[in-house]
Image (spheres, coloured by chain):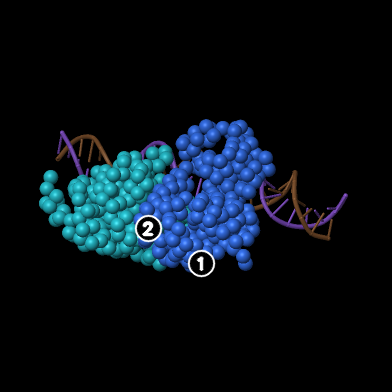
Chain colours: A blue, B cyan, C brown, D purple
DNA sequence: TATATTCATTGACCTATATCAGTCCGATAT
DNA sequence: ATATCGGACTGATATAGGTCAATGAATATA
């Protein structure tokens, strides 16, 4: 399989992944050694929870979600991933198995980076290692916030959080695209699909959002923030 | 205030904090510069959520808990902290405010370490920076696991998890001491105090534990693991 | 010793949320 | 066009879990 054809060489990726901007050309070369890219179709599993974490992945094109297979056949979606984000680090750094899966939401192009090469560069470049630590710390703190939200807020608050997250961090628009199913909304907010639908309909009746098939348009993010605050 | 009197110099701490074992004498000296220790009484706040993260703390003696003030006047206890653990790193590394408080459960002696000194050493010693990253990654992955447990398991499962955690990771004994109140059990498992009491009583009726005042003795960790699995 | 005060405990009741059993609708296959 | 299938949706019902009020035990304070 021809890598150049798939992802236009590694230059793009090196330029745009914020994490890599601290690296010299030689260091980039180390990272790029053994690197390869693969195209995934909608619904395909890019990384499977439980497999050995030998590679990090960098999302080059498309759209994916990270999720955990939890208890009672339920999934929890951690977040959505757009290009130029690195995923799979934490498990790799502790030398373990992936604790979550990464699944393509659309056609997605992904680059696999050898962990050993990553570690080599981590130890050789202190600016880079600081960046990585900041990133990891940020992940941890966000996880704590999410933990509190999921365990203490009721459904309306959690759904408001989900809508705010998708709108401001993923779609960068008042409109949340049809890639997100009701089941996904449920898996992100940790409620049943039926409940997710109910709450969304309720938001629509209250003229906070408009539902158009799977597309969701946010009319009042002010109201959403209120609801999020109230819990 | 005489530091030597309080904590016996820094040598103990340097020896025993696992994170510090990668450091040379000079590096330890940097870390120890501007370092000072303070003794806290039961219930006192060691670090307050929302304050600027200028210091890491190292717990030298005693017993503390980290917790988040969440929604609707509820707290979530993240974990309990025993000597030779460093706390407060993540917020410090991203240069922000602490996202959780640290509260003394008993009389506790704590050492404050200047973040800038920590960062200096982090950038100069790659073995150390790797250790720090592994630690941070581990925190993150545990947080994810906890997140899934709290959001997907029902009360019995969550309480079983709490008992297993306290027994195997904190008390290293079948007996959980009277330092942990019912409210704390509730705050750790994210349920109301009344519910926590009810579940514990139920476990007692089923001869899984014995309640003796606030002391809890675990009779069958096998059964607890079953309950934890079932969710 | 008497009196507050805090915390564990319990039962009764209420609410949030899940589950179930459908209907409806749009997309694809025949 | 017709069958079929997977979502979205909805109402009825069941249940987990929260809230409240009362009691008792333990501990602190006057």
Q: Which circle's residue, 2 or 1, is located before the other in the chain? A: 1
| Marker disc for residue A125 | 2
* Relative height, residue A187 to residue B125 (above, below): above
The chain to which mark 2 is attached is: A
Measured as percent of width and height from the top left, residue A62 is found at 60, 52
Q: According to the image, label 1 marks what residue?
A: A34
| Marker disc for residue A46 | none
Measured as percent of width and height from the top left, residue B122 is found at 31, 55
Residue A133 visible in the picture: no
How many numbered discs? 2
User: What residue appears at the point 37 percent right and 61 percent down from the top-left corner?
Assistant: A123
User: What residue appears at the point 30 percent right and 57 percent down from the top-left corner?
Assistant: B124
Q: Secondary structure at mark 2?
A: loop
Q: Nearer the viewer, residue A52 or B187?
A: A52
Quick one: label 1, few (<14), some, or many (20+) residues within 10 Å?
few
The chain to which mark 1 is attached is: A
Mark 2 vs mark 1, CA separation in Å: 20 Å
User: What residue appears at the point 52 percent right and 32 percent down from the top-left corner?
Assistant: A222
Q: Nearer the viewer, residue B151 or A131?
A: A131
Q: Nearer the viewer, residue A166 or D15?
A: A166
Q: Nearer the viewer, residue A102 or B205?
A: A102
Which quadrant would the N terminus of chain B be assigned to in this image? top left
Disc 2 and disc 1 on one polypeptide chain: yes
């Amino acid at each position: 399989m021809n890598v150049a054809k798939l992802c236009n060489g590694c230059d793009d990726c090196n330029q745009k992944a914020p994490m890599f901007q601290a690296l010299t050309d030689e260091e980039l070369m180390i990272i790029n050694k053994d690197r390869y890219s693969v195209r995934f179709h909608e619904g395909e599993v890019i990384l499977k929870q439980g497999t050995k974490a030998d590679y990090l992945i960098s999302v080059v094109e498309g759209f994916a979600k990270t999720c955990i297979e939890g208890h009672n056949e339920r999934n929890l979606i951690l977040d959505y991933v757009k290009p130029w984000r690195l995923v799979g680090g934490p498990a790799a750094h502790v030398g373990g198995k992936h604790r979550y899966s990464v699944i393509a939401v659309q056609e997605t192009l992904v680059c696999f980076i050898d962990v050993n090469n990553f570690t080599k560069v981590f130890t050789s470049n202190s600016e880079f290692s600081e960046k990585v630590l900041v990133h990891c710390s940020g992940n941890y703190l966000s996880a704590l916030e999410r933990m509190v939200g999921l365990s203490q807020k009721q459904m309306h608050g959690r759904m408001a959080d989900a809508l705010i997250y998708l709108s401001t961090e993923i779609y960068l628009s008042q409109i949340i695209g049809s890639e997100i199913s009701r089941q996904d909304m449920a898996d992100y907010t940790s409620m049943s699909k039926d409940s997710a639908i109910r709450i969304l309909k309720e938001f629509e009746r209250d003229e906070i959002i408009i539902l158009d098939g799977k597309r969701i348009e946010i009319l009042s993010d002010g109201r959403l923030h209120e609801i999020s605050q109230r819990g």
